[in-house]
Image (cartoon, rainbow, N blue to C red):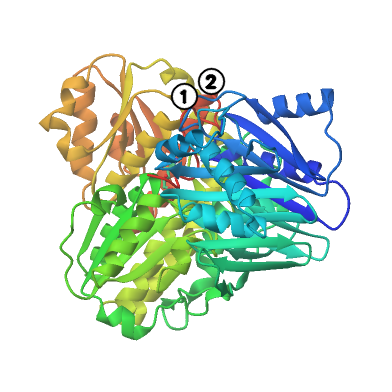
Amino acid sequence: MCGIVGAVLTEGSVLEGLLGGLRVLEYRGYDSAGVALGLEGGVSIRRKAGRIEKLEDDLRAVPLADSPIGIGHTRWATHGPPTDENAHPHTDNQRRLALVHNGIIENHSELRAELEAEGVTFSSGTDTEALAHLLGRELDRSAPSLAEALRRALRLVHGYYAVAAMRFGDEKELVCARQGPPICVGVTPEGSYLGSDVLALIPHTRDIVFLEDGDVCELAPGRMEVTRIDGSVVQRASHHVSWEEADAGKGVYPHYMLKEIHEQPDVLARTAFSRIDEARGDVNLGHDELGDGGWSDALLQSIDRVQVAACGTALHAGYIARYLIEGLARIPVDVDYASEFRYRDPVLAPNTLALAISQSGETADTLAAQRLAREKGCTPAAICNVAGSTLVRESDAVVLTNAGPEIGVASTKAFVAQVIAAYLLAVRLGRARGVIDRVQGLELVRELRLLRPSLERLLSEDHVAEIKAVAGRHLNAKGFMFLGRGINYPVALEGALKLKEISYMHAEGYPAGEMKHGPIALIEPGMSTVVVNSRGLVADKARSNVEQVRARGGQVICVGSDPESLALADEAIEVPRSSEWLSPVLNVIPLQLLSYEIARLRGCDIDKPRNLAKSVTVE
Ligand code: M6R
């Protein structure tokens, strides 16, 4: 989704900082980029279709005059194709101001018609430009400040937006507003900064204010003021973010995805180890920034049902959470796509915990599902990676996953952290409700510690080389089927999603027991089937799938710790043994690496896969 940055400095030039911020936000996905700088009495705008490098080349060829105030944008086209004209920032007819926007202005056609009837000329096909002209109209109508012009204009707008605007008249004015997609701000004596996410701000400050829906924020060096759209002043607390600037880099790796895959042993430690309470055979779900995270014994004991809602990879973690919470804490769990849950008028039992799972905490469907569940009387809770995100702020109880920033569009370490967080929650629920005793609890938490050496082994050079070789042999497969059973069925779904996202190969994930009900028709020579099978309750069931596929001429790659399945398969990727409950954490690693290697060999743009955005903040 689009990225927004902005800054106003006491002195100096803002341009390099804006371009740096846009580069940090590249991972969100975009197809054009632009900046606007304030000039006394006006703005200068430069925008280009394509990558930020094209914009930078253009700025080198014809530099803009230095300015202490500016905004920048990476656009992910919705209304109008990705051309120079449609790139942001946009301006009014007198070029007094510049404006950037993420989201959708639903009544843009009506606004456009109204403004054109008043003599306004449009120069793009975007919905955003109408908002820039509305601001101009409010300035013509003597709005006393840009902030007031924005408040007045937004009263006329229907839709979802994060918006930033600036002008350099008698004063330097930088403003932003939010209704839906996130925007956050940070203030230092040297300058004030805004961005679509925390990563764009941490080079300047780690004390961040996250705007709420309906907020309008006015920024100046050393100060900020937040109002509602009606002009009433509100206070917003700042959150200290512990992420480091270096977390946003690739380190020694060629891609963010590979870096994040290799971070997973540390993610396990950060998500789980400091929470383990061996003396009590239990875990603490809290976090430095969130105290006990809202997980009081009273809450844990009052839950009769859990309803999980999430999207994409986070949904797959949700399916695993179902096995864990039902299996370990004996509480019934339902899981749904957030996008379906929000529109199906769900019937929710009393004392339901609505558990939203999200890396970003800003996914529009997940937030909507969570709000609906709250309206229907559920207790909103979250497993989330971003401390100050909307989901965290709107939840009564939170397990922060502590995975650190995830930049690769294909989620890897966030998934593993979500599964571990779900395991911790299941153990805590079981302990608080007396379903798990201290000795069992101790055994369960010790299993977590055993994972680290296994993860390290899976990421060793030898193991990675083995997977590269497998990838090379299946590069030109007609298609991929991923099968898993029990708690490893969602791992099969995740393996298929990873492969299709970054290599664009056709891949489907199924519960292994479903194969004979239809998908088996796809099996033929040239078709590759990945069977995820670890020792445990259903290992012999999934093993028979290996035989069925091979009997029909299909190629089987077996991933897991079930020795018989590994022996039967064409390709065996052995995974160290663990408890069955935690086997997804290990089994997913070879699938992530397999997708990565296939995508790399096929020459795909791994960190910026086509058509995908990292954070889907609109419907
Ligand atoms: O930020 P979220 O976890 O809420 O995002 C949910 C999905 O959009 C996300 O997991 C998506 O499916 C990833 N691209 C998967 O790799």
Classify residue 21 as left or right of residue 489.
Answer: right
Instruction: Tell me if residue 540 comes above or below residue 379 in the rendering.
Output: above
Q: Position of residue 166 (x, y in %)?
A: 69, 49
Residue at figure coordinates x 36%, y 17% from the top left = 477
Instruction: Tell me if residue 443 comes above or below residue 454 in the rendering.
Output: below
Residue at figure coordinates x 56%, y 26% from the top left = 605
Residue denoted by label 2: 601
Q: Do the residues labelled 1 and 2 touch (CB within 8 Å)?
A: yes
Mark whose residue sits in front, 1 or 2: 2
Query: Three-letter amino acid code at disc 2?
Result: Leu
Of 310 and 606, the residue lying toward us? 310
Of 258 and 5, the residue lying toward us? 5
Residue 491 visible in the current orientation: yes
Residue denoted by label 1: 471
Of 516 and 417, the residue lying toward us? 417
Quadrant in the picture for residue 540: top left
Q: How far apart are marks 1 and 2 (CA)?
A: 8 Å
Instruction: Tell me if residue 597 comes above or below residue 261 in the rendering.
Output: above
Q: Mark 2 or mark 1, which is nearer the start of the sequence?
A: 1
Q: What secondary structure is found at the residue carrying circle 1?
A: helix
